[in-house]
Image (spheres, coloured by chain):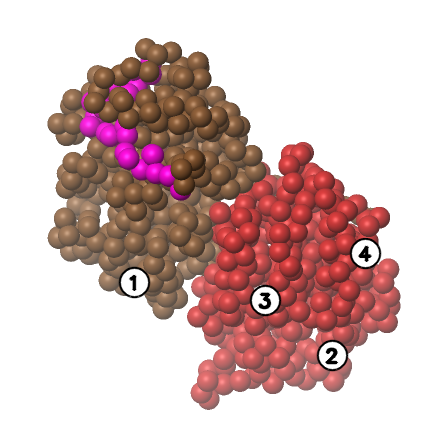
Chain colours: A brown, B red
Amino acid sequence: MKLLQQSFSVSFQYPVYFSENIFQNQNQILKEVLSADGVASQKKLFFVIDEGVSQNHPKLVDQIKNYCKHLEEVATLVSEPLIVPGGEEVKNNRTYLDKILSITNEKGIDRHSYILAIGGGAVLDMAGFACAVAHRGIRYIRIPTTVLAQNDSGVGVKNGINAFGKKNFLGSFAPPFAVINDFTFLSTLDDRDWRAGISEAVKVALIKDREFFTFLEEHATKLLERDNASMQYLIYQCAKLHLDHIASSGDPFEFGSSRPLDFGHWSAHKLEQLTNFELRHGEAVAIGMALDVTYACLKGWLKEEEWKRILALLLKLGFEIFVPELLDNENKDVHRILAGLAEFREHLGGALTIMLLREIGKGEEVHEMDQDLILRSIEVLQRSQNKTLVI
Amino acid sequence: MKLLQQSFSVSFQYPVYFSENIFQNQNQILKEVLSADGVASQKKLFFVIDEGVSQNHPKLVDQIKNYCKHLEEVATLVSEPLIVPGGEEVKNNRTYLDKILSITNEKGIDRHSYILAIGGGAVLDMAGFACAVAHRGIRYIRIPTTVLAQNDSGVGVKNGINAFGKKNFLGSFAPPFAVINDFTFLSTLDDRDWRAGISEAVKVALIKDREFFTFLEEHATKLLERDNASMQYLIYQCAKLHLDHIASSGDPFEFGSSRPLDFGHWSAHKLEQLTNFELRHGEAVAIGMALDVTYACLKGWLKEEEWKRILALLLKLGFEIFVPELLDNENKDVHRILAGLAEFREHLGGALTIMLLREIGKGEEVHEMDQDLILRSIEVLQRSQNKTLVI
């Protein structure tokens, strides 16, 4: 018996820009990105746009076409932009993925061409999956338009669509070619989407950066009043922590079972499903974090004082910390929310691994959770939703 | 405008075993592979088997079940093996991919479970694509059963299916968890498949290893007589050169346009299509190499003496070096084969990059090919097919 041991590394690089009005002619970012490979030949470009974004920015398609006229030396649009619905619909219905693939085929979009997607996280996930699998990888430029996509999902390395009723059942790890965060798009978000994206910032502050948590406490009112400077700093800092984590975790493609950035997510994923996606992802994560910090406090890990600070911040930002679905029963004794633990384990693969808080800014992983303690935590949240924080 | 530059590396490792009778109880390889992660928990296993292999080895499924009984401490079969057709059919028809995905869903196969595929390159490509995209990556063990899959495609990092009538239009780069080459499967190959796999060995010898080329010349008769020892060395050496190339090329996921291992492939891909896949991939590669070495000789790069050695080896191994499809015309002046250049460029993305030979064992890339010289090379091949080698 003979054996050859294969071993190699692949390095990935991509820039993440923070800017405004990226399709105004004086903005050079896109031109810079498209010229970055140093190859003089004309590149093909194809845009996919979130329907909600194109409705809120009716001149967007014209702006893109106009901007692309000034790109003539480096790139050309090969097709009209494709407008697709936002939200889970675009990930549930395979039509949209297939449409991108068929345009890729028809227009001869190749591995050195660019597909650019403008939209919320769901549109970016779906278009990214198309780019990852067509010709084994088309260059993909993400232009996230929501707080959540700009500070979290849009800067990472994952993509995917839903299948068999499961979120992200199909997907891959495929770093983008570039990410361009354009703050201009945030102005048309409704208050609910503006707020929902803040919860991933609270999350990453809680597990990684105590100082950033203090910033969020101090700027909660300004954030609610839609102060742009505060939000821009929040997005930049949250994206930075996210990028640092991917680069330094030692496991960017998640071969292991540890996924610290999924703090608060085991119940959040389940709550999204139990509420038929009435809860936004960020709203569900806020409840999921409230649940897991309460658990950590009852478990004796997190000091009561810190627990209060965290719940007070979530409440001040306007998040719910309790929804009736937390108490949904399959039968008298089985709470549906608890199935979220098993589903989360299956999604991770291997052993259950849950991030819990020791203190603000410092997490630690556990491999099991006590079901009674989870149910007691839910009771605490139910009592605390009126803002009387007593554990 | 602010900018964050993301940068990280991902390291990949996998073992490639060369063995016999891997499902006999005394063979410990599979057990070793399944225990390699050091995690004590029971793993889930699911097998996908090439129909041709299961017909030629009617006891295979029973052997697998019996072997898995001895794996009880580390793993269990979660489903009956799925039998799928071999060849391009399994990549053309999405039914088989969808079937693997749906079993993955039903049986709770997760990122730390194993899908094992036994078969020729097409089955391995299709099953590998399913593994790459389900849950963003199930652990995938390839058990190649043909010469071509054992020495070439099965040890690499690509997977894929066909779409829009194009080979490998959908796919990804996803290194396997392990590759287990079981020489026992070669005994039931027909002579044509046995021979076809040899052409990738000629290819890699021509561009990388002059000594290996001499080995092939010296063992051509033995290889034709189906001498196992000669074939096992050929497979080992070819796989080794292939693995070394991936690890040391600096571009294992082919972000650039250079793909030296695709020597002879631009016309080979086109000939497979023009012959409606009557030509096996290896047979088409033999003709493609004959064409490109003739071109290199006419161009003044390759000495006539070396050109003769190469064509003589291909002919001695029983390969055709000419098929009438090389002369197929779209109209009077346009040879269909020349479209293969443009399609190859589109498949690579970016600039056309073709590997040509300077001498046996030494290639050099060019970015254009002279169409008249290609047509003259085809004429030379037509004249030379009767084994009178005159350029």
In primary-sequence order, the first of circles 4 and 2 is 4
Real-space CA distance between mark 2 and mark 1, rounded to the nearest whole angstrom: 48 Å
Q: Amino acid at mark 2?
A: Leu
Real-space CA distance between mark 3 and mark 4, rounded to the nearest whole angstrom: 33 Å
Front one among A173 and B233: A173
Q: Secondary structure at mark 2?
A: loop
Question: Would you say B263 lies left or right of B238 here?
Answer: left
Query: Closer to us: mark 4 or mark 1?
Result: 4
The magenta stretch is A306-330
Question: Would you say B192 lies left or right of B158 here?
Answer: right
Q: Which residue is mark 2?
A: B389
Tell me where residue B122 appears, x and y as whole percent: 61, 65
Q: Quadrant of residue B126?
A: bottom right
Question: Residue drawn 47% across and 61% down?
Answer: B170
Q: Which residue is mark 3?
A: B265
The disc label shown at residue A78, or none: 1
Q: Secondary structure at mark 3?
A: helix
Question: Residue drawn 46% across and 36% down?
Answer: A341
Real-space CA distance between mark 4 and mark 1, rounded to the nearest whole angstrom: 53 Å
Query: Closer to us: mark 4 or mark 2?
Result: 4
Q: Amino acid at mark 3?
A: His
Q: What chain is tagged by disc 1?
A: A
Q: Which residue is mark 4?
A: B21
Q: Amino acid at mark 1?
A: Val
Real-space CA distance between mark 1 and mark 3, rounded to the nearest whole angstrom: 28 Å
Q: Secondary structure at mark 4?
A: loop
The quarter of the rendered structure image containing the C terminus of chain B is bottom right
Question: Residue drawn 59% across and 66% down?
Answer: B265
Question: Would you say B227 lies left or right of A231 here?
Answer: right
Residue count near mark 1 (Cα–Cα under 10 Å), binned few <14, some 14–19, many ≥20: some
